[in-house]
Amino acid sequence: MNNGITIVEFRVAMETYGARRLADCDGTRYSITVPNFNVSGVDFIHSGSYYIVQRGHIAPDELMDQAMAELGEKYPGGRHFWYGEIHSVRGLLTLASMLEGKYSKDLVDELVNKTYQTLLNSSFIKETLEFQFHDTHSAKMKTLFHLLTEYSNIVNPFASNTLNLAEPAQYLDSVDVSISDRPRLCLSSDSAHINTDFSIDSTGWYYHTFLPLQKNRKEATISMGLYYENGSNGQPVDEVVYLSFNANLHKYPDPNDIDLRISLKTGLAWKNCHEKQATLATDEQIETMIHYLRITIKKMKRRMLRKMIKK
């Protein structure tokens, strides 16, 4: 799925391009204050949701067709352009540079790289996972800790010191990178139907992945993640790894479904919304979490991360 273009991505892309900034205004879809830039007489305004619109002098249809053709789109409704909407940083920079008669693929690649290098240098994205709690009441919990560190570096590969990532322009056609100022980082792959989500704020941080899985000739899904909570005094309260496995998309509930949470602080396990019934995690429950975490890591590496690694 295409995550579109966030407000902060739009602002940084236009600043990187050197567009003339106008007074902020209300978004065209939601009444929130959004940036407003002008390129060659065309005002580009963020909708307030996930796309850009043009106001005032509109780019000619011939130029829009040229921009779409350059990015391999014959009709509106694709990855970069919809009807009257721009949905990607590359689409925006392509159209802007064409308006000024200086388009080249190399120029847009350079601008895309500079835009995302600026965005990916945000302090929250460089944040590395440091466990606050180290309950090692069993050898299996130690294995779980090790895998969670590896998992966090896949959900947010930009915080890793060991991955040799390619330039953004080399993989953005196959892996969507969405950055918002909540702050939040999302990665997704249309072809693999995989989504990842990393966010951090004063209440804690959150890692999440979702991916499809074929098991026993049935369509299944794995939704799992790790979250860390701050208390009202700002001190760490707990870290929890969770798993939701839907064994059959066409049958809910299914007897093979799994709903499991394990606290890294206490070693307790429970089902969602049933924390009061938590009991010490059994070896079988920890093994289950490890099993699906390994599946998730393997599939994320093969289906998405490998597309981002420098060749």
Image: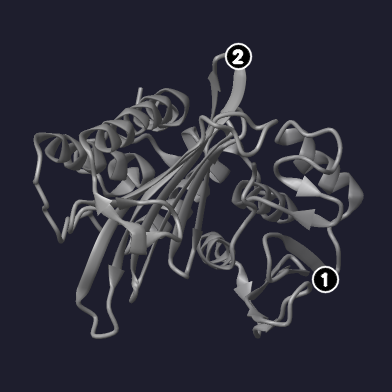
Residue 177: image location, x then y, percent: 50, 47
Q: Residues within 10 Å of mark 1 (few under 14, many from 20)?
A: some
Q: Residue at x 65, y 32 (%)?
A: 249
24 or 134: which is nearer to us? 134
Q: Residue at x 30, y 68 (%)?
A: 229
275 or 208: which is nearer to us? 275
Q: Nearer the viewer, mark 2 or mark 1?
A: 2
User: Is 25 drawn above or below residue 123 in the view shown?
Assistant: below
Residue 303: image location, x then y, percent: 47, 25
Q: Where's the C terminus, which quadrant?
A: top left
The residue type indicated by label 1 comes to Arg
Secondary structure category for the residue under label 2: loop
Residue 89: image location, x then y, percent: 60, 52
Residue 95: image location, x then y, percent: 72, 51
198 vs 77, left or right, is: left
Residue on which disc 2 sits:
217
8 vs 50, left or right, is: left
Query: What residue occupies the far right of the structure in this picture?
Result: 61
Secondary structure category for the residue under label 1: strand
Residue on which disc 1 sits:
55
Q: CA distance from mark 2 to mark 1?
A: 51 Å
User: Is 202 drawn above or below residue 107 in the view shown?
Assistant: below
Mark nearer the N terminus (2 vs 1): 1
